[in-house]
Amino acid sequence: MSDLDFEMKLDRLFNEPPAMPDSEAFARLVELRLDRGWSVRQVALGAAGLVAGLVGVVQVLGSRLVLETAAAATGRQAEALGGSLLSLLEVGEAASALPYGGQVIWMGAALGVMALAFAVTRAVEELK
């Protein structure tokens, strides 16, 4: 028959990992790496939000909402606002007059921003 006390002692020895002399330094290193990754993620999310906002603005300008707002506005100040909004719309129409279309250019810009974000992420991981 086996000795129950010996088996319990053996189980305790194998269940508890041995204490490492540099465990505090290792924990600090892991925390620093996690904090550094979080700041990169915040920058990447901010950049993605900025790109999404720009795409939203382009979509609103392309939906003729600007023309309807300018047509509904009355008065001198409204005419000035309508004129500035119309000039923004003309810029958007100029981009869509290119041979490839405005959507292709915006998608290319978005893909370029994403590639830049991946490159920065990769560079930060290489520094670790």
Image: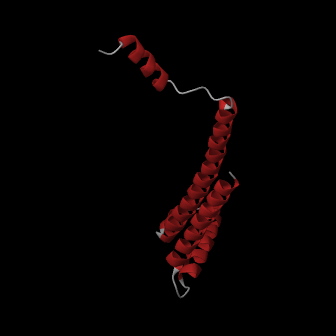
Q: Residue furthest top?
A: 5
Judge by depth and name the residue closer to the eye, 43 or 11.
11
Tell me: residue 88, above or below residue 10: below
Tell me: residue 45, above or below residue 80: above
Q: Quadrant of residue 110?
A: bottom right
Q: Residue furthest front?
A: 1
Point out residue 89 in the picture as x, y percentages from the top left corner. 57, 73
Does residue 126 appear in this view?
yes
Q: Residue furthest left?
A: 1
Tell me: residue 100, above or below residue 41: below
Q: Residue at x 66, y 35 (%)?
A: 26
Judge by depth and name the residue closer to the eye, 27 or 90.
27
Does residue 71 appear in this view?
no
Tell me: residue 97, above or below residue 84: below
11 relative to 43 in the view: left or right: left
Q: Residue at x 40, y 11 (%)?
A: 5
How many marks are shown on the rendered structure?
0
Q: Quadrant of residue 33?
A: top right
63 relative to 57 in the view: left or right: left
Quadrant for the N terminus, please.
top left
Point out residue 65 in the picture as x, y percentages from the top left corner. 48, 65
Q: What sort of colour scheme is used for the picture?
A: secondary structure
Judge by depth and name the residue closer to the eye, 80 or 128.
128
Point out residue 18 in the picture as x, y percentages from the top left corner. 57, 26
Q: Residue at x 64, y 52 (%)?
A: 43
Q: Residue at x 56, y 55 (%)?
A: 49
83 relative to 3 in the view: left or right: right
Q: Residue furthest bottom?
A: 99
Point out residue 63 in the picture as x, y percentages from the top left corner. 46, 69
